[in-house]
Image: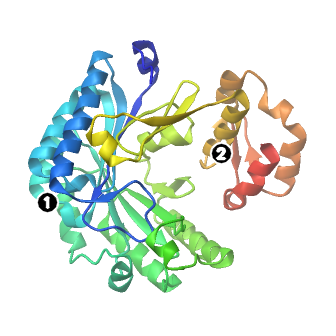
Amino acid sequence: MNITKSKIKRINSLYIHIPFCTKICPYCDFVKVLDIPSFRIKYVDEIIKDISFLYSLDAKFKTIYIGGGTPSILTYDELEKLLSALKPLLKTNYEFTIEANPESIDETKLKIMKKYGINRISIGIQSFNKSLLESINRDFNIDYFKLINLVKKYITNINVDLIYGLPNQSLEMIKEDLEFFIKLDINHISTYSLILEKNTVFSLKGVKEVDDETSRTYYDYILSYLRKHNFKRYEVSNFAKEGYESKHNLTYWKDKEYLALGVGASGYIGNIRYKNSSSLSKYLNGIRDYKSEVVTPKDELEYYFICNLRLEKGFTFKNFQNKFNFDFLKRYKDIIVSLKNKNLVDYNGTNFYCTDEGIMLLDEVLRELI
């Protein structure tokens, strides 16, 4: 891919993918492989080659996000090697996030993370319920209060992932998970409904998603509960206390450009959206294969609606005008009136956004606009 200094200067966000896991979650459709130490060591070396190329372009980023897979699976030496390579790419006032699983977090790793500038951590807990954790191959013997207090000594901006709609999960279990989460006293939560993608373990076993009515009941409860506890929903699945919204993920949801390194990682530069090859063997052998699509003006408009209308605040008329060079309210006047009459959208002097109902029926809103 032709990446130049002028293109890099526009890009503020970098994603790094670490695909290795000790166990494979039955619902996960991200690019991942069971951990093989020799592969992991070589993979880090290859990632650093790509990072070194960014040095030659004088690249600097406001946000860097290391996801997976399980980035916290890296050994102390591997983690230090990767983070020391990434630190020079940070601008001032940055957000530097790493994903981690509870069982692979320890104090030495936290010290290394802090040393090289990690200031946000996303912990994939998924549930605090032992029987549910067993059903998703994540039954770790963890004292979560002890773990979170340890993390807080080094990183105070903490996200926890929770999932709902799992087989045999009840509303009462969700309530207990949320209550436990609040007791941990952290500042961000991502709550995801179970979606069964092809070729995941759950899909191959014939596990079914909960019906729409049940999913809506679960989501409405989560939304109400977290709002009562001073969490603001700023995106469909993400809730934060004031000032703790994920700056990196807002890059995606605001449809801005970002760079991505590693197997299976997707990026967006100029009018090109690309996805790196999911072949680990190719990557380990230095082959940087990727697929790309040219984003037409029509595509870009659709992406903009799909991404921005997931946000509680939607998008600003000023940003829309600057990006597409026409007046949104004038062009979509009749559609807006129709959607507003259905209580699916609303707007003020600066922003157009979905209502609570509109966010739940976002597909209907998008069908009208696209």
Q: Residue furthest right?
A: 334
Callout 1 touching callout 2 (CB < 8 Å): no
Q: Hey, which quadrant is residue 52 in on the image? A: top left
Q: With respect to residue 152, does 348 lie above or below? A: above
Please, what secondary structure does the residue beneath circle 1 have? Answer: loop
In percent of width and height, residue 128 lies at 34, 76
- Residue at 35%, 75% in the rendered image: 180
Q: Hey, which quadrant is residue 359 in on the image? A: bottom right
Placement of the N terminus among the 4 image quadrants:
top left
Placement of the C terminus among the 4 image quadrants:
top right
Disc 1 marks a residue whose amino acid type is Asp
- Residue at 32%, 30% in the rendered image: 93
Front-most of 94 and 133?
133
Q: Which mark is residue 67?
A: none
Front-most of 285 and 276?
285
Residue 154 visible in rendering: no
Please, what secondary structure does the residue beneath circle 2 have? Answer: helix
Number of disc labels: 2
Which residue, given by chain and number where applicable, does mark 1 sit on? 106
In percent of width and height, residue 24 lies at 34, 67
Q: With respect to residue 177, does 92 lie above or below? A: above
